[in-house]
Amino acid sequence: MTQSGKNIEWLQNQAPPTVKRMGLTWLIAAAIATAVLWQIPGGDYILYPFTILATWFHEMAHGLMAMLLGGQFQQLQIFSNGSGVASYAVPVSFDPIRRAIIAAAGPMGPPIAGAALILASRSFKIASLSLKILGGFLLLSTLIWVRSPFGFVLIPLLGLIILGISLKTPHWFQGFGIQFLGVQACVSTYHQLDYLFSYSAGSLGISDTAQIQQNLLLPYWFWGGLMAIASLIILVQSLRVTYYK
């Protein structure tokens, strides 16, 4: 390939600076609008698909972390009210640190996944590939772990929509789309602030932060605050790296 051909190929793989600048403005606006919509009546209906996706990130993080540390990821249930439960089994010999890491993986799953999606938007090719991987993994997780009737319908539907975006839309839309999904995942942490700063999880038992407290002693509100701050830092840093490096 000639040098000219390489330059053209490189340009096709990079987001144009004007689109990047416009994208950052719109993404910041989308993040603010999301936070506002969560606080007003009817706002949850508009953001409902992103709420379900964030729940999927949260519960998958619990289950996959349990697997990585030597446990078993048994099943995943997602319900129409936006809540979910990851069922996993760990050996009795598991030390408190590993148990705390599994508990923390849930709240930190959406912001970490969101940051990865935002960073993937730096290249059109990687953005398109990442959308395909995300859509495919939503479908795969349905076959392997999802066991609630609602989740068995909506999770693959989200996967098919995301795959459709990766296959049928222009590159610039894929880049912006994956960034938008990333921001939604990151700011979902602030949708569950009451959960992060609660000891109880209602009928589901105790919250993730309460589980961390049981294993690492410091109070649940300390861990809730730490994860809220960490989520904001992850979002800001992922945007900074994407747009200014």
Image (cartoon, rainbow, N blue to C red):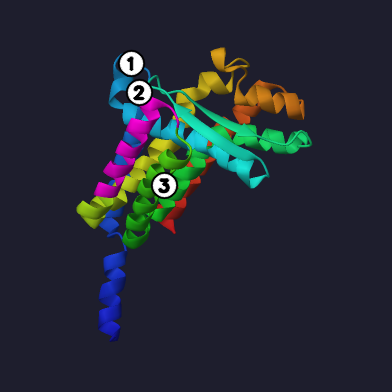
Which residue matches tag 3?
Answer: 137
Label located before the other in sequence (3 or 2) = 2
Secondary structure mostly seen in magenta is helix
The magenta stretch spans residue 133: no
Q: Residue at x 29, y 48 (%)?
A: 163
Label located before the other in sequence (1 or 3) = 1
Q: Are marks 1 and 3 in contact (CB under 8 Å)?
A: no
Query: Could you tell me which secondary element the residue under label 1 belongs to?
Result: loop
User: What type is the residue that disc 1 sits on?
Assistant: Ile
Most foreground residue, 193 or 147: 147
Q: Determine the CA span between mark 1 and mark 3.
A: 32 Å
Q: Determine the CA span between mark 2 and mark 1.
A: 7 Å
Instruction: Give the residues drawn in magenta, as a range.
Output: 147-164
Which residue matches tag 1?
Answer: 40
Query: Could you tell me which secondary element the residue under label 2 belongs to?
Result: helix
Q: In the image, is residue 73 above or below residue 2?
A: above
Query: Could you tell me which secondary element the residue under label 3 belongs to?
Result: helix
Q: Nearer the viewer, mark 3 or mark 2?
A: 3
Q: Determine the CA span between mark 3 and mark 2.
A: 30 Å
Q: Are marks 2 and 1 in contact (CB under 8 Å)?
A: yes
User: What type is the residue that disc 2 sits on?
Assistant: Val
Q: Are marks 3 and 2 in contact (CB under 8 Å)?
A: no
Most foreground residue, 76 or 224: 76
